[in-house]
Image (spheres, helix red, strand yellow):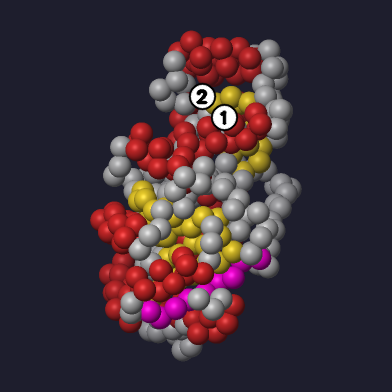
Amino acid sequence: MVSPLIALMKDQVAQLQKRGISAQALYTGLDRAWIDRYLDEAADGKLKFLYLSPERLKTELFLARVARMPLSLLAIDEAHCISQWGYDFRPAYLEISAFRALYPQLTTIALTASATPQVQEDIRQKLHFRPGHQTFQSSFARANLSYSVFEEEDKARKLQQIMQKVPGTAVVYVRNRKRTQVIAELLRKQGFSADYYHAGLPHSQRAERQEAWTQDQTRIIVATNAFGMGIDKPDVRVVVHWDLPDSLEAYYQEAGRAGRDGQKAYAVAFYTGQDLDEMQKKIENSLPAPRFHPAGISGPGQLFSSGRQCRRNAKF
């Protein structure tokens, strides 16, 4: 199993072991003796799953030992990294096809919770899937998840109201690192158990805060989009976007971390007129000016124009 994050590998290995399924993970910082042991166990058929990063697929040690393993499946988790971030975030994702070429008969599956048709096609091309491959896709619609969008000048007041009315675990997404700390402190002053998370924190601190949230020691985590890839906590009851995300795909992926247990959950987004103006400028600055503007195509504000209608789903 190819996976991008150590925390994700550890979490999934722990979940499999709880179910009595033999699994281990190879990751940076693991003692060489343990790496040798797990590779031997895999070669002897004692492991059902072996998790590793895409970078490790290229190492001489792994390539030498994998030849002895009874391989049955190559599973690539968070496969959107191949297209969405692979070019700069994890270039090794783009080189998985080289490993596949060594074992052309090995069944391969690419897994992702959110991928547009364009990203799906990019994944197929980068992995060199042969014609006739199969695609399995569930509906984007989730009956248990209520989507709400609020035009709200006083976001702090609205957030407090939501947290008081919706019990259980929550995630609040914001756009920058400083704001994670500010809003977490605001929530603590309001009497909530909250902490913050962003990529600038030391790895050990990030792991501790994620673990505390996962184990319900912290109720609310305020985070940038650095938090969440591979998070599989089933009982998240509400995901709030304090700031508008960059795309519908990002919003769907982040909001979809709520209600994975199938119980009622809420995805809430806040915006102000200024937020829409800033998003408009950001899009205009990132794209060349069009020669014409097709009739009927609205600006970025259209992304959340159905907010008042969505409000009927959740009365906070």
Q: Nearer the viewer, residue 307 or 302?
A: 307
Label 1 vs 2, first from the N-terminus:
2
Q: In the picture provided, is 55 more to the left or to the right than 204?
A: right
Q: CA distance from mark 1 to mark 2?
A: 6 Å
Task: Say which residue appears at 36% left-offset and 73% top-offset.
Answer: 157
Which class describes the residues within 10 Å of circle 1: few (<14), some (14-19), or many (20+)? Answer: many
Quadrant of the image occupied by residue 263 = bottom right
Cβ atoms at labels 1 and 2 below 8 Å apart: yes
Residue 51's label in the rendered image is 1
Q: Secondary structure at mark 2?
A: loop
Task: Say which residue appears at 51% left-offset and 55% top-offset.
Answer: 169
From this viewpoint, which residue is outermost toward the left?
178
Q: In the picture provided, is 101 more to the left or to the right than 316?
A: right
Q: Where residue 78 sits: x, y (%)?
A: 54, 45
Q: Secondary structure at mark 1?
A: strand
Q: Where residue 292 sits: x, y (%)?
A: 38, 84
Q: Which residues are magenta?
A: 144-152
The vertical placement of 101 against 265, above or below, is: above
Q: Where residue 77 sits: x, y (%)?
A: 57, 41
Which class describes the residues within 10 Å of circle 2: few (<14), some (14-19), or many (20+)? Answer: many
The vertical placement of 211 against 192, above or below, is: above
Majority secondary structure of magenta residues: strand
Q: Where residue 199 sits: x, y (%)?
A: 33, 45
Q: Nearer the viewer, residue 254 or 110?
A: 254
**Label 1 is placed on what type of residue?**
Tyr
Locate the N terminus and report the quarter of the image it occupies.
top right
Does the magenta-highlighted stretch encompass residue 77?
no
Task: Say which residue appears at 51% left-offset and 38% top-offset.
Answer: 8
Does the magenta-highlighted stretch encompass residue 146?
yes
Residue 64's label in the rendered image is none
Residue at the spot of label 2: 26
